[in-house]
Image: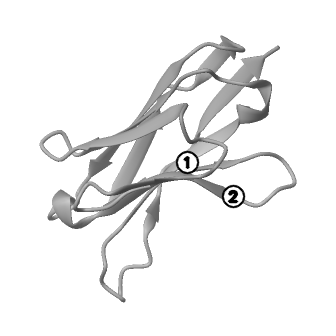
Amino acid sequence: VQLQASGGGLVQAGGSLRLSCVVSNASVFRLYALSWYRQTPGTQRELVAAISTGYRKTYADSAKGRFTISRDNAEKTVYLQMNGLKPEDTAVYFCYAKTPSTTDKGHWGQGTQVTVSS
């Protein structure tokens, strides 16, 4: 299973970005729970948003009301729409996919840089 994230970039505070993550070589994509994490230098990776196989969504407090996670099972893609961006949203964003199987340790994308200028 490979994950390819894209859509990051440089944006001014208050702007928007849409991240995409395409999952390839997943036998049954709809069985994967999907998440977005972010990380800044010297800190641990933190969960931003997640969407379950049943489309249930959860968000970090910092993302609520500004970010929206979605998935397209036909396109094998997970999205993160980010609006009202703040300088503190600056980070490398990673997508993550995992099935409920205990033998599945999960799969990470390569990360995409989001930089928000003030």
First of labels 1, 2 by sequence position:
2
Label 2 sits on residue: 45
Mark 1 nearby-residue class (10 Å; few <14, some 14–19, many ≥20): many
| Residue 94 horizontal/vertical position (percent) | 55, 48
User: Which quadrant of the figure has residue 12?
Assistant: top right
| Residue 43 horizontal/vertical position (percent) | 82, 56
Residue 21 visible to the viewer: no
- Depth check: give the residue in front, 106 or 53: 53
Cα separation, mark 1 vs mark 2, equals: 9 Å
In the depicted structure, whether residue 71 falls above or below residue 1: above
| Residue 27 horizontal/vertical position (percent) | 16, 64
User: Which quadrant of the figure has residue 117?
Assistant: top right
Find the residue positioned furthest to the front. Answer: 65
The residue sitting at 73% across, 25% down in the picture is: 86
Residue at disc 2, secondary structure: loop
- Depth check: give the residue in front, 25 or 53: 53
The residue sitting at 24% across, 62% down in the picture is: 53
Identified by mark 2, the residue type is Arg
Placement of the N terminus among the 4 image quadrants: bottom left
Residue 97 visible to the viewer: yes
Residue at disc 1, secondary structure: strand
Placement of the C terminus among the 4 image quadrants: top right
In the depicted structure, whether residue 106 falls above or below residue 25: below
Identified by mark 1, the residue type is Phe
Q: Is residue 79 rendered to the left or right of residue 38?
A: left
Label 1 sits on residue: 94
Q: Is residue 19 rendered to the left or right of residue 55?
A: right
The residue sitting at 71% across, 33% down in the picture is: 89
Q: Do the CB atoms of the residues marked 1 and 2 lie less than 8 Å apart?
A: yes
